[in-house]
Image (cartoon, rainbow, N blue to C red):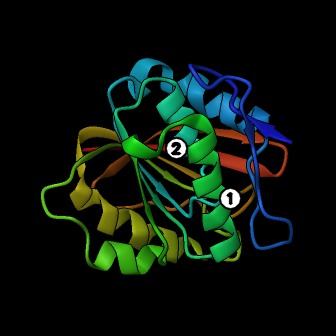
Amino acid sequence: MMRVIGGRYRGLRLSAPRGRSTRPPTGRVRESIFSALGERARGADILDLYAGSGSFGIEALSRGGRSAVFVERWRPAVAALRSNLDAAGAREAAEVFSSSVESYLADPREGRRFNIVFADPPWDISSEDVVGVLEKVSGLMSRGAVAVVTRRANDDVPVAKGFDIEDRRRHGDTEIIRYLKE
């Protein structure tokens, strides 16, 4: 059972579809990410790629985020995400794109800038593909913005142009990599 761990939606239960197509992050992973982000979520515009049930973006909205865009292609996850946004009363601050990350990044909204980007891709996506996603999303990020990527521990760490690795942390079988946009 996932719950929002901080902010105004604290304690809210988040639904997630059953099956192997999603891998909801543990509370420990989310707590580590948001402890490291500190107050950066307050007033931020968030992009949640490979959003699944939306736990990262909803957590950021709970902690004072201004808006969130969620990108997820698996229909059961999109349904769970919309249900979670409704339960939080956060639909007005959110946009949900039911598409692949690649399709979304090929045709983003003009002029949109994000302060925080979350990318929690399936673990079978290569590090090279993650680098491609980071390099495409870079144009949508403000200077000094943060990208948080989760990967399977012991996978190659994606190194993308235009980003400095600000921090790396491991929790069980998950590695969290926080990038700072140059």
Separation of marks 1 and 2 at Cα, in angstroms:
13 Å
x%, y% of residue 163?
Answer: 34, 50
Work out whether residue 138 can be spotted: yes
What residue is shown at x 64% (from left), y 53% (from top)? 83
> 50 or 29, which lies in front?
50
Amino acid on which disc 2 is placed: Gly
x%, y% of residue 5?
Answer: 70, 26
Would you place residue 42 above or below residue 144 in this image? above
Q: Quadrant of residue 17?
A: bottom right
Residue receiving disc 1: 80
Q: Residue 124's mark? A: none
Amino acid on which disc 1 is placed: Ala
Mark 1 or mark 2, which has the lower sequence index?
2
Work out whether residue 177 can be spotted: no
Would you place residue 35 above or below residue 83 in this image? above
Q: Residue 57's mark? A: 2
What residue is shown at x 67% (from left), y 69% (from top)? 122
Would you place residue 10 above or below residue 122 in this image? above
x%, y% of residue 4?
Answer: 68, 31
Element type at mark 1 = helix
Q: Quadrant of residue 29?
A: top right
